[in-house]
Amino acid sequence: MSLDTSMLHKIAPSMQRSILITLAGLLVSAAMVFFLVWPARARVHALAAELNTLRDTLATVRADIADTEAQRRKTAGVRSQYDALVQSGVLQPLLNSFAMRGKSLLDPLAQQTGFAIANVKDDRFLRLQVPKQAPLQLHGRQLIEFSGQGAYTSIVDFIALAEEQLPLCTLAGLKIISQTQTPETHKAFITFEWPAKGEKRTP
């Protein structure tokens, strides 16, 4: 140990200072690497991962924006179909009569199927619940009874065609009476129900 000390004493003071400065520099460099470089590298990795996530989000948003116009056109098409269905299906009076409107809609279908409509009349109007201050236009469900005659197949075909051509029209009642004089032709009372809109009525 004394040999080592004696060797150190033999080194010139300027060299000793250089060695101490070098050792101090190495310690400072190690401290900088440990306290600054490594945390900075970890932060860079975290930022890179966050940047990749943001890139994915941006790509998704751009795809959604590009799809907006197509979605708008699709919505407009569905809205048009809905409006057409309501326009053709919601019953409104003809000459102040729901029965006349129903007859005007079902006469062509009856002719196609061979069912002869002899009479038509308004049945019940089932009101929907409305506020105490009832509006001038009321919405409800209107029942209309059609009476006529035809073969059994004609009656069935007439009902099926009516429900196919007028999707909001539904069968609410059916009564078939056989005719002894004409066994192939039956008398039928057919009640259809529609969503309806009409003037406010007094009870």
Image (cartoon, rainbow, N blue to C red):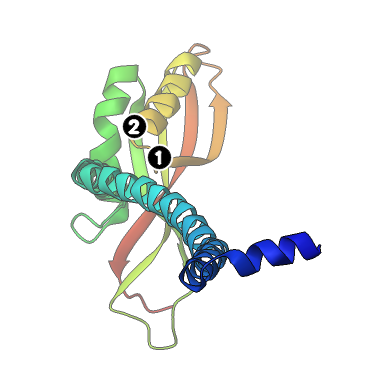
Q: Amino acid at mark 2?
A: Ile
Image point (45%, 23%), residue name: 155
Closest to the observer: 168 or 46?
A: 46
* x then y, percent, for residue 57: 37, 50
What is the CA distance from the residue labelled 2 to the residue labelled 1?
7 Å
On screen, residue 48 versus residue 174, left or right, reads left
Closest to the observer: 143 or 32?
A: 32
Residue lying at the far bottom of the rendered structure: 133
On screen, residue 4 versus residue 78, left or right, reads right
Secondary element under disc 1, as helix, strand or loop, is: strand
Closest to the observer: 132 or 86?
A: 86
* x then y, percent, for residue 19: 53, 65
Q: Are marks 2 and 1 in contact (CB under 8 Å)?
A: yes
The disc placed on residue 117 is 2
> How many discs appear?
2
Image point (21%, 40%), residue name: 70
Secondary element under disc 2, as helix, strand or loop, is: strand
Above or below residue 17? Residue 57 is above
Closest to the observer: 54 or 13?
A: 13
**Screen quadrant of the C terminus:** bottom left
Looking at the image, tell me whether mark 2 or mark 1 is earlier in sequence order: 2
